Structure formats: structure tokens, C-alpha cells
Amino acid sequence: MSRVHRILAAIVPPPKREWVRAHEAEYEAIHGRWRRWRWTVGVVPIVGRALANQLRHDPRSFLGGELMQATISALSIVNISAGLALLGLYASASSPPRLVLMVALALLIQGSYTVAFLADAFRARPKAARLLQLGGSTLALLVGTVGFGAGLLANIDSTDPENGPMTISLLIAAHGLASLLTFAAPRPLNTPSP
């Protein structure tokens, strides 16, 4: 079963899980890139309805669930990549601002700590690690939101808008929000939802 279909099977209520398996079999039977792309685009509204149905019946299942863990894993990898790219930019530019270095390090730390937390690297002190993760996520959400707002206000009157700082701020805020939704779960991570 593919990762997408495992996630779908986790969020779709049990009576409809056969439907997910049937969709996976149908996808495997389709040959040709254009036909697979059309099929994938056609699944988007179905997935949206399944998510809406799950939210309606059990909204707490998203907190700390497999879908949010997959989302935060992907965002953490993007954060690490963006941090490395900014470090490369800082190293190669002549007299870059120190803020670039600080943001690059923040992205690297945020992404790396979250990946380590998801990998259960802090077993010795789980409560302290969880509090540090939640505190860092809250701070990232606030800093990212303020940075995005400041970038938006600076770009309103500018003839040469700067989209890079706004994009990085949005990335930091999105990671913070997804991290809060993932780790604020009332149940411990890596345990199946009821």
C-alpha cells in the first residue's frame, strides 16, 4: 500500500476503507502518465470530502495523527533544505546581512529538532523535549506571522517587492502551526488513535 493510500486508510472511517483499497487497485491498473495524472486530480475532491467527514465525526483525530506527522516531517525537510540554501547564500555573497545567517540557523535548528523529536531521539527526557518542542513551535508561529506581516507591509509601497523574506516567514509560521497541531495532541505520539 502506498504512503498516500495508508494515510487515506488512516483517516477514512472503517466502513469505507475498502473504498480506499479499491482506489489503490484502480490506480495501479491505469497505464500512461496522462491518465494517472487525470485520475489523481479526480481524487482530490474525494479526499477533501473524506477529510471533511473525518473532521465532522472525530476532529481530535487530526491532532498528532499520521496525517499531521507526515505533514510536519515534510515541512521539517523543507526547513532544513531552506536553511542549507540560505547558509550557502550567506557563504557565497559578499558582505551579506547577519540576519540571513540567523534565519538559516533558525530553519536548520527548527527542522532538525522536529525530525529528531519525531524519530524519538529524546526518550530520556520526553516531557522536557515535548515542552521545548511546543515552546519553539509557538515562538516559530509568532515570529513567522510577524515576519510575513512586516514583509507584506514593506512590499505594499515598494516598486521592487521582496518575496524571499515573506516566503521564509510563511515557511517558519506554517512549520510552527503544523508542529503545534501535531504535538499538542492529548495522547502520546506513535500510539494509534481509537
Image (cartoon, helix red, strand yellow):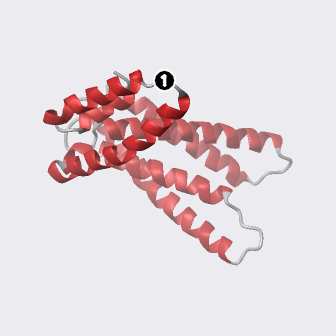
Residue 79 picture quarter: top right
Q: Secondary structure at mark 1?
A: loop
Residue at the (49%, 62%) spot, across then down:
145
In percent of width and height, residue 185 lies at: 25, 44
Front residue of 23/145: it is 23
Asked which quadrant contains residue 91, the reply is top right
| Residue at the spot of label 1 | 31
Q: Is residue 49 left or right of residue 122?
A: left
The residue closer to the viewer here, 190 or 6, is 6
**Location of residue 125 with respect to 132 vertically, above or below:** above
Left or right: 184 as drawn, with respect to 156: left
Where is 156 relative to 81, above or below?
below
Q: Position of residue 187 (x, y in %)?
A: 19, 39
- At 27% from the left and 31% from the top, the residue drawn is 20
Q: Amino acid at mark 1?
A: His
Residue 100 appears left or right of 30:
right
Image quadrant where one finds the C terminus: top left
Crowd class of label 1 (few under 14; some 14 to 19; many from 20; radius 10 Å): few
Q: Which residue ends up furthest to the bottom in the rendered image?
A: 157
- Residue shown at the point (60%, 53%) measured from the top left: 168
| Residue plotted at (34% across, 21% down) | 1
